[in-house]
Amino acid sequence: MRNIPVLCVQDTTLAKAYESALIALFKDGTRFRTQYDKEGDPLSLDCTMNITIDNPMADPMIHKAFPGGFADLREYVYELQGLKDGWTKDMNDPTDTRWEYTYHGRLQNYGQWKEKHDDVSKQMGAFSVDQIEAVIQKLVDQPFSRQAQMITWMPNHDLDCFDPPCLQSLWYRILEDDDGVQWLNCNVRFRSNDAWGASFMNMFGFIMFNREVIADEVAKRTGDRVELGRLNWHADSYHIYGKDIAQAKSRLFDRLETTAFEDRTYDFQDEMIQEMYHEEEPAILKKIEDMNGRYGV
């Protein structure tokens, strides 16, 4: 094979689109080595994937096959809202093994990663850009703008970073319907997306980020009703690691013909599911508070 497959799926809800994308990858993806393979690991399944979710907040929203729980989803949403931005490493300390960045940190404080610890960068003039604020205000001032985007990639650092950001960019534009409702459309690009181990949580997290951080603030400033329109999710490498293929088969692919789709999903707005999603909030916030204290944040 000379070409990496380019696969496209479109569906109405997150759970449906997630499942459709995994099935397409399993059926039509190609086999690839990765730099993370251990001796004896099977080759990964890989493709370039484009996923369109027509109604991101609609049910069924949650797929039971994702390898995690509701507490993991809730904690990830907190992370994307910036509650773990203080967990990044001191670049002057070679023994510091904390994260080199957070997505929220790159979006809200772009330029403030290595620069704030690097004397040479300071002399050259370190900078910081709050892209979240800039995007929100741009959508308020000109909702049809094609310039409302945020990026994470910092080539002066990330080309040599051991674990550079998978998320690359978020792009927004608002359409208004005949009833005056504003619909926030979003394109998300990942350079690398672990289809089985992370993509559901990534998509859920950024849907909630778009709802709670972007759309709600635009609505607050304009007085308009702002809903989430379609989410287009592009992954340059959408993959299932070879070590995870057996688990994906047993938890999803081998069950497709013996279970109904409704039995493979949850309605996020279901009262019991909402309770499960929110009940761990105190413990999660306490965990984050404790870690912040440990890191001196």
Image: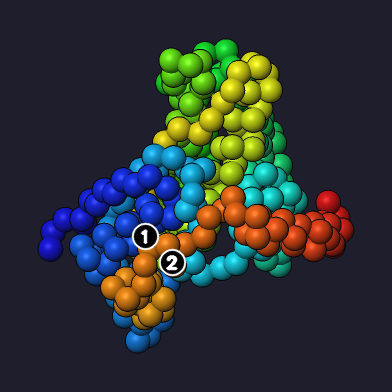
Element on which disc 2 rests? helix
Q: Is residue 57 above or below residue 29?
A: above
| Residue under numbered circle 2 | 264
Q: Is residue 230 above or below residue 159?
A: above
| Residue under numbered circle 1 | 19
Q: Are marks 1 and 2 in contact (CB under 8 Å)?
A: yes
User: Looking at the picture, which amino acid does disc 2 mark?
Assistant: Arg
Q: Earlier in the sequence, mark 1 or mark 2?
A: 1
User: Looking at the picture, which amino acid does disc 1 mark?
Assistant: Glu
Residue shown at 51%/70% (left/top)?
A: 67
Nearest to the eye among marks 1 and 2: give it. 2
x and y percentages locating residue 212 in the rendered image = 64, 38
Element on which disc 1 rests? helix
Colour scheme of this structure image?
rainbow
Circle on res. 122: none
Residue 154 in view here: no
Q: Is residue 120 above or below residue 250?
A: above
x and y percentages locating residue 251 in the rendered image = 41, 76
Q: Nearer the viewer, residue 10 or 147?
A: 10
> Badge 2, how many Cα within 10 Å: few under 14, some, many 20+?
some
x and y percentages locating residue 213 in the rendered image = 64, 35
Instruction: Residue at the far left: name it.
Output: 1
Residue shown at 48%/16% (left/top)?
A: 179
